[in-house]
Amino acid sequence: MPRKIAAGNWKMNGLAASLAEVSQLPKGGDVTVLICPPATLLAPMAALGRDVAAGGQDCHVAASGAHTGDISAPMLADAGATYVIVGHSERRTDHGETSETVAQKAQSAYAAGLIAVICLGETLDQREAGETLAVIAEQLKASIPAEATAQNTVIAYEPVWAIGTGKVPTIEQIAEVHDALRAALPDTSLLYGGSVKASNAAEIFSVANVDGALVGGASLTAADFGPIITALSDS
Ligand code: 13P
């Protein structure tokens, strides 16, 4: 059985005081609770000693070198991370990352002993053109390295048009993509991401082949994220 994962992506949000939210999260039971705070908070978050996994939000392809402002997978691991998100649509859009770069980043994550949370998803134009499954298949092929296994990789399906917009795909739309992902990756944890909140989490987790969620805005406070963890635990 793929493991259930409730993952929070804090993006560029969070100061030291925000760690109090992590301390207040409910126990996950059979759910792995993962928080990906800004890199500045990784070490203090890991030091909380809570049963919450810590993850980076991105890593450089290289392990070290002259890349001002970047952070490498071994550095994330050194700070206490066990996961790293790669290929988030905001990285693909804001930093021009290609699927080939994403695959290299995943390889760098594996080399550092990190689990890569590889993100993919279609734009609104692609969905409206009926290209969703073709886009997902292409991203899967190009973004996932040959070394990927169900142990070192998690996939997050995040439709670009659902991220931070309050728009959520229908249950049927989520199911269609997750069924296709499951056919390709039988044992890998498959997360849905995009406007997940306490009020829609249980319905999303009832979809076959959805093993959890990658949550942005609603992961920033324990009041919002706690019920999502509980909904996954109850599913
Ligand atoms: P929101 O939950 O804020 O829509 O963000 C989703 C996301 O991008 C998580 O990586």
Image (cartoon, rainbow, N blue to C red):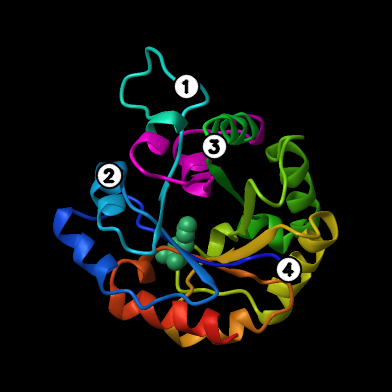
For marks 3 and 4, give the CA distance.
22 Å
Classed neighbour count for the residue bearing mark 4: other residues with Cα under 10 Å, few (<14), some (14–19), many (≥20) = few
Tag 2: residue type? Ala
Question: Residue placed farthest to the top in the image?
Answer: 66
Residue 87 belongs to the span the image colors magenta: yes
Residue 160, x across and y down, in percent: 56, 57
Q: Residue 113 carries which label?
A: 3
| Mark 2 or mark 3, earlier in chain | 2
Write the residue at 71% across / 57% down. Answer: 188
Residue pointed to by mark 1: 63
In the image, residue 15 sits, relative to residue 139, either above or below, namely below
Q: Can residue 50 be seen in this view?
A: yes
Residue pointed to by mark 4: 1
In the image, residue 111 sits, relative to residue 7, either above or below, namely above
Lateral position of residue 21 relative to residue 64, left or right: left
Residue pointed to by mark 2: 43
For marks 1 and 4, give the CA distance.
32 Å
Identify the magenta region: 76-101
Question: Residue placed farthest to the right in the image?
Answer: 183
Tag 1: residue type? Ala
Give the label, 1 or 3, closer to the camera. 3
CB of mark 3 near ligand 1 (< 8 Å):
no
Tag 4: residue type? Met
Q: In which quarter of the image is ligand 1?
A: bottom left
In the image, residue 40 sits, relative to residue 69, either above or below, namely below
For marks 2 and 3, give the CA distance.
17 Å
